[in-house]
Each structure stands twice: as structure tokens, then as C-alpha cells.
Image (tube, rainbow, N blue to C red):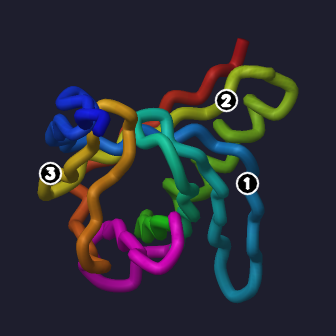
Amino acid sequence: MKLADKEVNKWKKIDKIILLVNSIDINYESSISLNLNCNFENISRGRCNINIQKVLKKTPDTLYIHTDQPLMVVNIFYKIEKIEKLINFLGMNKSNKKKIRLELDISDNLMVNNDGYLYVKDKFELKINSISWNIPII
């Protein structure tokens, strides 16, 4: 009988989710919204869809974690001027090979093991405290 490696089962808490943007779509109907498809930098598996839309009321930015599929959904609410400014900055990256990077500072910790696998028992939603963008332009 082989003993399980104790290091594999070590879990650590993370309070930030780091994302690398793969693609960006702009939707324009009555107002502008952005959809970003991302991979994780600090979590091993899964993908993340980010929806950036016009703020209507004091709606918090949220992160929704699914349990039936390796997917997180982030909803970010900005004033329309901030969305337009972000589109301009994102456009500066179009010929750059370096990926756009986001850091989401979340309201509660997530558990990740040494291999980067996320522990999720039930689907849940977290509030996002802050969002940091790193957009390479050169």
C-alpha cells in the first residue's frame, strides 16, 4: 500500500484571484458592455467569464463559483465613462503578445492546494472588494 503524499493535501488560503485575458468582446445595444474570457494564473483548472456592464444602482461587483463545471463568472459594474476609457486602454494592447492581467481582491478566502486545485463544496457568490488591471502596451 502506497502512502499518500502529505504535501499534496496541504491547503492554503488565497484572497486574490489572478486572471489572464484570452479574448474580449464588445456588446453594444442600448449601452456598451464587455465580455472577457480568461484563464487563471493562481488556480490550476477552469476558466472565468467576466461581464463588465453599466452600473444602474449601487450594485456590488461579484464572483460566482460553479460546482458543476470548472467556471467562475464575474460581474463588474462601472460608469459608462469608465467602460469607454477601459476600451481605449484595451485597444492599446491589441498588437501586444503579453496578456492583460486582472487581480480580483475578494471578500472571503478561497482554499487552493499545492497543485493549485480549488476546493469548492457548494456553489457560492463572493463580493469583489477591488479590481486591479495590468494592460501591457509596449
Res 99 label: 2
Q: Say which amino acid is labelled 2.
A: Lys
Q: Residues within 10 Å of mark 1 (few under 14, many from 20)?
A: some
Q: In the image, is residue 103 above or below residue 52?
A: above
Q: Say which amino acid is labelled 1.
A: Ile
Name the residue nearer the viewer: 37 or 138.
37
Furthest residue toward top = 138
Check disc 3 and report the residue beneath it: 109
Q: Say which amino acid is labelled 3.
A: Asn
Q: CA distance from mark 3 to mark 2?
A: 25 Å
Q: Residues within 10 Å of mark 3 (few under 14, many from 20)?
A: some
| Residue located 36% across and 73% down the image | 64
Please tell me in which quadrant of the rendered image residue 121 appears.
bottom left
In contact (CB < 8 Å): disc 1 and disc 2: no
Disc 2, SS: loop
**First-in-chain label (3 vs 1):** 1
Residue 96 image position (x, y, % from top left): 80, 22
The reply to whether residue 19 is in sight is: yes
Residue 19 image position (x, y, % from top left): 50, 42
Please tell me in which quadrant of the rendered image residue 27 appears.
bottom right
Task: Please indicate whether residue 32 sits to the left or right of residue 64 in the image.
Answer: right
Q: CA distance from mark 3 to mark 1?
A: 28 Å
Q: CA distance from mark 1 to mark 2?
A: 11 Å
Check disc 1 and report the residue beneath it: 24
Furthest residue toward front = 1
What segment is highlighted magenta in the picture?
54-70
Q: In the image, is residue 59 above or below residue 131?
A: below
